[in-house]
């Protein structure tokens, strides 16, 4: 230990020299990438399997996008139960929104309800899946806000 403390400047200089040598002798990574191509994960690993699934889904025309609609207010379920049920009904029946799936708080099981409603009961999350080929995300947001504006 004393040898390290006495030779601290020598050790520091050796580290700096070693770093400089490695920096100078390191291959040009940009050039290597150009010549050899991008490194990819070998087959058989979960990441490569996930990439294959994503490619297959995009080839099959899977255009569903998932979002979450957020409702906020004190004691939201107790205070606004009827208007929330109307909102769920509007979202489920409206053809202009191109909704594929919606998880309603009022039809969900006990475990899912716990995940959808915050502990302080001020925030309710509603997961929604819609067809992104038929409606853009920005248009979807505008239409949902427009449809639910009357329930405020």
Image (spheres, rainbow, N blue to C red):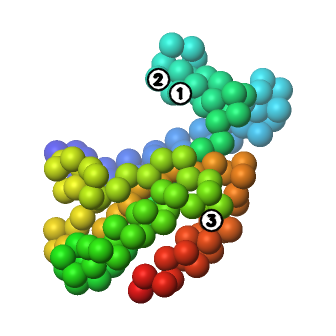
Label drawn at residue 3: none
Q: Is residue 15 above or below residue 127?
A: above
Q: Residue at x 48, y 47 (%)?
A: 101
Q: Dot 1 lies on which element?
A: helix
Q: Is residue 27 above or below residue 90?
A: above
> Residues under labels 2 and 3: Cα distance?
33 Å
> Which one is earlier in the sequence, the residue at label 2 or at label 3?
2
Question: In front here: 26 or 101?
Answer: 101
Which numbered mark, 2 or 3, is in the foreground of this view? Answer: 3
Question: In front here: 37 or 30?
Answer: 37
Q: Which residue is the site of mark 3?
A: 140
Question: In front here: 64 or 32?
Answer: 64
Question: In front here: 115 or 134?
Answer: 134
Q: Dot 2 lies on which element?
A: helix
Corner quadrant of residue 64: top right
Q: Which residue is the site of mark 2?
A: 46
Residue 95 horizontal/vertical position (percent): 62, 57
Residue 151 horizontal/vertical position (percent): 43, 82
Mark 2: few, some, or many residues within 10 Å (few <14, many ≥20)? few
């Amino acid at each position: 230990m004393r040898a390290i403390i006495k030779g601290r400047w020598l050790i520091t200089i050796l580290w700096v020299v070693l770093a400089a040598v490695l920096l100078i002798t390191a291959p040009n990574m940009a050039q290597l990438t150009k010549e050899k191509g991008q490194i990819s994960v070998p087959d058989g690993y979960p990441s490569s399997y996930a990439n294959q699934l994503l490619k297959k889904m995009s080839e099959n025309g899977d255009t569903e996008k998932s979002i979450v609609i957020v409702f906020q207010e004190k004691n939201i379920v107790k205070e606004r139960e009827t208007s929330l049920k109307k909102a769920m009904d509007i979202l489920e029946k409206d053809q202009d929104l191109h909704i594929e799936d919606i998880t309603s708080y009022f039809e969900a099981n006990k475990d899912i309800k716990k995940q959808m409603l915050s502990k302080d009961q001020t925030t309710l999350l509603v997961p929604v899946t819609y067809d992104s080929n038929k409606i853009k995300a920005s248009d979807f947001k505008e239409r949902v806000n427009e449809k639910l504006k009357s329930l405020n």
